[in-house]
Structure formats: C-alpha cells, structure tokens
Image (tube, rainbow, N blue to C red):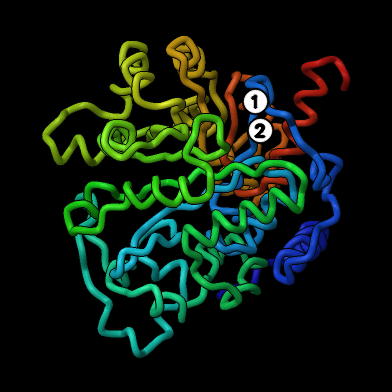
Amino acid sequence: MTTAPARPARRARLAAATLAAAVALPLTALSAAADPAHDPAHDGDVPLVVGHRGASAYVPEHTLAGYRLAARTGADVIEPDLVPTKDGVLVVRHENEISGTTDVAEHPEFADRRTTKTVDGVEQTGWFTEDFTLAELKTLRAVERLPELRQESTVYDGFYEVPTFEEVLAERAALSEELGRDIGVIPEIKHSTYFQEIGLPMEQSVVALLAEYGLNAPDSGATVQSFELTNLVDLRTRYGLRADSVFLTSAEGAPYDLVAAGDPRTYADLLIPSALRDLARHVNAVGPALTQVVPLREDGTLGEPTTLVRDAHRAGLEVVPYTLRPENEFLPVDYRTGDDPADFGRVVDLAQEYFATGIDGIFTDSPDVAVAARDRWLAERDGEG
C-alpha cells in the first residue's frame, strides 16, 4: 500500500476520535454539536444525521467501534447492512462478498471457499457470507474497504469482529442509555430476491429481532430499508412490520426484484409523482442517491436541485439521500480542496446545499461533519448565525 502524505490537522482529529472508539471510551465533543447530550429533538423540521455503516470515514465500516463513534459524534441513527450466514444468522456487512471488508483472504483454512457467483445479475468472485457459519465468520476481522483513500483507518485493520444484527441492536440500546438520547437504527436488507432464491430469506428474522428489542412500532426509532420493492411490501403485508420503512433508489438501473419478475420499471420511473403516491401506501420514505436530489453538471460541478424532494413530500414521503462523504474523491469538483483525492474538501458547505433542498436527513460517512454542517445551516436558517 502506498502511504498517503501527511495531513497533520486531519490526522490529529482522526487519531483522537478513532482511538477513543477503539478502546470504547466516551468521546469528548469534536464540536459543540457532537456533545454526547446533544439531541436535535427531531420533529420533522430538523434533518436527521445517519451514520452510514457507522463512522466509515474514520473506522472500518460495519463494526461496533464504528457505530459507537458515529453515535458519540452526534449521529441520530446508525445503519447496519444485513446479509445472512450459512446457518441463517443475520450479520452486518455491506455485501455478502467479503474479500474487501474482512481479512478472509489471509485465512488459508478458507481458501477453498473462494468461488464465483451471480448476485442480482452481476458475476462476482470472492468469499460469500452464505458459505460460512457464524462461528467461522467470527474468526475473521474487519479491514478498511477503501485503503488508498482512508489510509488512517487501516491502522485498525484486524481489530474488530463481524457483528451480528442482534449485537448492533444491543449496542444501540447501550449507546442510547449512555448518551441520554434515543439512537435510531436503519437496517438495510441486502439482495432480498437472491437470498430468498437460495433459501436464506431475511425478512421474518428482521421483524422478529426488532420486536425482541421493542422496536417494531411506528416512530420507534427503527426503520427498515431496501433497494427492492417486493420485500418492503411483504414486510408490511406478510411479516408484520410496524416500524417505518424506506425504499432506496439509485440514479441508474432498476430494483432487482422487478428485473427478475420482468417488470420494466426503473428507479427513475418509481420516483415520478404518481409512482411516489403509490409508494406512500407501502413505505414512509425514499432514500435516493444525492445526485437524484442535486445532480452534477457535465463538468462535474454541482447543479440545480430536482423536484424530487418537493414531489416526495407532496406524496407524504420523507427523503433521506445517500451518501455524504468528506473526501475530494466523492465531492463535486467545485467543492474539492487541492489535488489529493483523500483530502477533505468543502463538505460542510456542500452539506448545507443539500439541507437547503428540504431533505429530512442524510446518510454520511463522517457524522461529526454532517452534524456541524446541520447546526450551522439551522442557525443561519433561523437567523441565529
């Protein structure tokens, strides 16, 4: 791995935050907004900050340390992505293919598990959670998924286990008690059609675990999300989900459940006003890509907002887009600072542009930054800045 050039200010801030997460001690505030007692008292007028896979800009994603860091730096909600093990336990990984997020390749005892599969129509080669028991997965350790951009996070490679969904729910409860405010949780059911086809459906288990932790109720702080639509409908009509739900969308393509069923509708088709009104019968919110809220121009600069937020609100749906990331690599070109893709750009200014569209929340890899941006935006909006 090529070592990134020193970035002293950033390194100092990250070192303090990630070290605190690693040893599981309460953090001091990174800003006034990150005070552990800070509570936005979300009433529909204050956008929520969702810790995307934890605090992924600083700590390997989908680890308990990452969720702790997210909550302790001000996130209102933490996000675990769910995939099953061979023995049907829900574990937390961005994908069921885990070669980029664990050290599985360094385990010779699992070398023969490397295989090629087609998931949602895409051929992939690697190691897959559904070929491991929970006990076997627990011998692996998380690694940074983007080591060239997030070199500081790689110092924690090998520190953390792959958590189960139940462990995340228990951690959420503990963090809520520690911080004196309710921390929400927004699990994403990954590749629902694929896992149903191979006999490892997740929907019923998700509802059962939410119920066990007292979260299967409207406004409980729990929200279930999916890039597929059929399972979101089934969660309501077949599996007894009473917690809120979110239909995730992409700037391109279509839900795989619709593709598999021969339904020609794309994500774009499902976000027109008439389709949004239909969606509102089944879900509480939509989770679009940021570029579906504010697209980029051809030159890569930030464009003008679309009508999506207005249209969704008129249909009775909230809008919580993804993913605000702080590095230049992920920013519009007019919000980048310098030439290093790994350096932080003008992400606070960018976040304020998104908040100004009327979104109800935002997924972010750096919750501390998003909280600071939100607080500055609210102060300016309310005439306090």
In the image, 28 versus 31, the foreground residue is 28
Q: Which residue is mark 1?
A: 355
Q: Is residue 256 left or right of residue 177?
A: left
* Label at residue 351: 2
Q: Position of residue 118 (x, y in %)?
A: 20, 58
Q: Is residue 35 left or right of residue 307?
A: right
* Label at residue 265: none
Are the residues tagged 2 and 1 within 8 Å (C-beta)? yes
The disc labelled 1 sits on which kind of residue? Phe
* Residue 14, image quadrant: bottom right
Q: Position of residue 30 (x, y in %)?
A: 82, 50
In the image, 245 versus 342, the foreground residue is 245
Q: From the viewer's perspective, is residue 140 above or below residue 379? A: below
Q: From the viewer's perspective, is residue 129 above or below residue 198? A: below
**From this viewpoint, is residue 7 visible?**
no
Mark 1 nearby-residue class (10 Å; few <14, some 14–19, many ≥20): some
**From this viewpoint, is residue 273 visible?**
yes
Q: Is residue 190 left or right of residue 354?
A: left
Q: Residue at x 50, y 65 (%)?
A: 163
Q: Residue at x 40, y 86 (%)?
A: 107
In the image, 350 versus 33, the foreground residue is 33
Q: CA distance from mark 2 to mark 1?
A: 6 Å
Q: From the viewer's perspective, is residue 255 above or below residue 316? A: below
The disc labelled 2 sits on which kind of residue? Ala
- Give the SS element for disc 2: helix
* Residue 65, image quadrant: bottom right
Q: Is residue 335 left or right of residue 309?
A: right
Q: Residue at x 32, y 37 (%)?
A: 235
